[in-house]
Amino acid sequence: MPETLEHSAAAGHRFDTVLIANRGEIAARIQRACRELGLKTVAICSEADREAPYGSTADSFLCIGPSSAAKSYLNQHAIILTARLAGAGAIHPGYGFLSENAAFADAVEKAGLVFIGPTASSIAIMGDKISAKRAMMAAGVPCVPGPDTALPDDPATIERIALEIGYPVIIKAAGGGGGRGMRVVPKADLLHEAIALTREEARKAFGSPSLYMEKFLEHPRHIEIQVICDDHGNALWLGHRDCSMQRRHQKVVEEAPAAGIAPDIIQPVGLACVKACLQIGYRGVGTFEFLYEDGAFYFIEMNTRLQVEHPVTEMTSGVDIVQAQIRVAQGHVLDLIQGDVTCEGHSFECRINAEDPESFLPSAGVVTHLALPAGPGIRVDTHIHAGYKVSPYYDSLIAKLIVHAPTRAEAMARMREALAGTEVEGISTNIPFLRALFEDGAFARGETDIHYLEQWLKLRRAA
């Protein structure tokens, strides 16, 4: 149990059993944190996940529906009913699925259970990119140039807004996320077609045609700031990460801290994020995402949940973020002040996916052989084992390989060795791709931005 958290909790938040409303490596990760806190767990599964290894270590393991996520992991009624029948006092949503669904968070609370995450109102505010930008501007968080209002329907007004911002601009869905619902517009004669296409995509994908417009930054890095807040007016930021290595807006490799950003530049931004959290009454963990270019930060969105890449911040800050998230939900007071938060060394995370390393098409099947690296500064978060059947129904992430070392160069060397010692047979994985990436000179020197990986892949295919 982390020494940085107070041990008294408000009576109204107490629970001793947690239902984990997720699957895969994050379900195993949450279960481990609960056991270390002395809490019981209820694991759930779809029919495709009946053989999940974390089921055998949970206090209860219950199938809630068919393989389709819509009928199992996204079935709000089934999850809440299962929690109540199993005697769980809280529900942890993990990431993805229902983790940022305000209606689900509200339904959990109305059922008399604790939602291990922010309130429904906080999720709603930060889930809509327009209201999130407005809240961030009010707190003094730097934002990408562009209005904090939805685009109107009038074509002439839209043209005027684009000219005021300056081309290139990017059109985004107000309710978007995961890299969907956005288009870059390099010049004026392409504007209205991009608006029409993005509105329709937003309506279909997110249930709302609402759009907004911002300046398109051409060579930014993707920088994140991790926060955690309790219900007693305390909020902290736990350092920063660089998540610029992306393919089709999906992160592939993350690292902490973000290299080459001086403390006097990042600190005011971190404190502004804390201020924003206090202003909206935020509770739990969250991540502020920024574009960083020419020494300036620009807010793009906030993720109101635990993120896939949280381990790199755990490794450098020394804070168990998942345990802290659970204890905050129990009503505990954060006993860590901002001055106590330090960043020690450097950490990388590689997402190991069941996919072809060239085409990146998903690869389902049985893992016939598995060898994972071990040693100082090496961590593997996974749920798979030899004999495990990788399902075609869900995200292709099967493991996260994390390393930590005193310097960035040493961490890169450690990751190269860790990747060399990772073997997965029976299915295709992106391990060969990751090995090649960690041999790239520009990446090793930190000379990358959010577009670099796509360009690197194009050059590799052309060679």
Image (tube, rainbow, N blue to C red):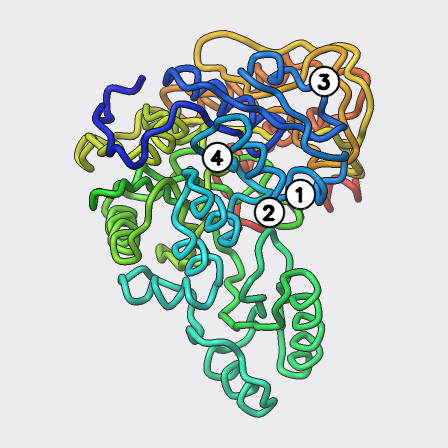
- Please identify the quadrant where the C terminus is shown: top right
Please name the residue shown 45% across and 76% down the image: 149
Foreground residue among 355 and 2: 2
Left or right, 211 with reference to 275: right
> Given this view, does label 4 or label 1 mark the residue nearer the observer?
4
Q: Which residue is mark 4?
A: 91
Distance (Cα) linking label 2 and label 4: 39 Å
Question: Is label 4 or label 3 in front?
Answer: 4
Could you say which disc has been placed on residue 456 in the image? 1
- Foreground disc of the pair 2, 4: 4
Q: Amino acid at mark 3?
A: Glu
Q: Is residue 247 left or right of residue 103?
A: right
Alpha-carbon span between mark 3 and mark 2:
39 Å
Q: Can you give x and y, in whole percent of width and height, for residue 203 in the image?
A: 67, 68
- Give percent across and percent down for residue 154: 58, 90
Residue at the disc numbered 3: 51
Residue 227 on image: x %, y %: 34, 42
> Real-space Cα distance between discs 4 and 1?
41 Å
What residue do we see at 35% from left, 55% from top? Answer: 295
Pointer 2 or 4: first along the chain: 4
Say what amino acid the circle numbered 2 marks. Tyr
Q: Look at 79% across and 11% down and name the residue there.
A: 368
